[in-house]
Amino acid sequence: MDGTRRRELSVRYTTVGKSGLKVSVIGLGCNNFGMRMDQDGADKVVGAALDAGVTLFDTADVYGGGQSEVLLGKALGSRREDVVVATKFGAKAAEGPYGRGSSRRHIVRSCEGSLRRLGTDHIDLYYQHYADPETPIEETLGALDDLVRAGKVRYAGTSNLAAWQLADAAHLAGPTRFVAAQVEWSLLERTVERDMVPAARHFGVGVIPYFPLASGLLSGKYRRGEEFPQGSRFAAMPRFAQGVATDDNFAIVERLTAYAESRDLTLLQLALSWPAAQPEVSSVLVGATRPEQATANAAAIVELTATQVAEIAELAAAVPA
């Protein structure tokens, strides 16, 4: 059996919402590129992800001050056409009144910059990073439609919106609509289940969770009362631990770990397979700083029964004793 066949068997592929865009059920989040990782590190992680069958690579114009896009583009190299590259516009990329937002002016300028840094002629999935209260959504969607017609963008998405904003965009969209919505969603952060996920389901928008491991707390590397491991995200960027590394969350992690072990699973498998099992989810974004992490993440998805999905959700929702 050749290597290509092995990759096809190791990773499941899905379509994004009601579009024809096909992606791997695990995507590589590249927000560490240019901050915690240099080109050599990015090359190794991207190579491992590609070898594991990952086809969705997610970045943004502001990650690493733009260096994430540069590193990702170089790491993909000649395999660019084998993958789906997603990037974003709208977050603060520069000082002054024109350095952020979702106006036509900023979108077109941001797109040109991302294309240049990525070293490509098109973006497969282009996200509005945050809602822009100063720009009508019709203008944003119109600018994205122009970029699609020009061949510079294939599909449009959004992230960090409220459910009503997603509904507004769905009702006002022309030929180009949002096919994907990135949301923070994990077994420790489930706020989106109240409104955003039902809205995405209703409008046929694929949900793509980020931080599914709660910045690593659900990876199993942290223990209650112990110092954060050297080189971990919490150790390198303590702000990510605030509000996450709490006693309540550690109690949930301990219950989930016991559940996983009783079923011959790992906490990592549980943490990634649970969101992947949700019918609205198209792909789950996971970062990696080492190639072995990328390989492990891609191999972590297991099929959960409906009963297991419900049991896991109940364990994560229970109030610690």
Image: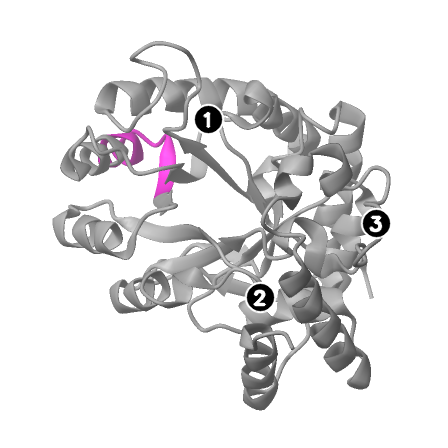
Q: Determine the residue located farthest toward the front in the rendered image.
A: 321
What amino acid is at disc 2? Leu
- Distance between the alpha carbons at the discs numbered 3 and 2: 23 Å
Q: Secondary structure at mark 3?
A: helix
Mark 3 and 1 residues: CB-CB less than 8 Å, in contact? no
Q: Secondary structure at mark 2?
A: loop
For the N terminus, give its image quadrant. Answer: bottom right
Task: Of the two numbered discs 1 and 2 on the same chain, state the one appearing first in sequence.
Answer: 1
Task: Of the two numbered discs 3 and 2 on the same chain, state the one appearing first in sequence.
Answer: 2
Quick check: can you spot residue 252?
yes
Marker disc for residue 292: 3
Q: Position of residue 35 (x, y in %)?
A: 68, 26
The residue lying at 74 percent from left, 28 percent from top is 37
What amino acid is at disc 1? Asp
For the C terminus, give its image quadrant. Answer: bottom right
The residue lying at 40 percent from left, 10 percent from top is 95
The mark lying in front, picked from 1 and 2, is 2
Q: Position of residue 167 (x, y in %)?
A: 21, 56
- Between 116 and 274, the one lying in front of the other is 274
On screen, residue 301 versus residue 133, left or right, reads: right
Q: Which residues are magenta?
A: 145-155
What amino acid is at disc 3? Glu
* Rendered image quadrant of residue 212: bottom right
Image height check: is 12 above or below 156?
A: below
Q: Residues within 10 Å of mark 2 (few under 14, many from 20)?
A: many
Residue of label 1 = 121
Q: Position of residue 33 (x, y in %)?
A: 67, 30
Residue of label 2 = 187
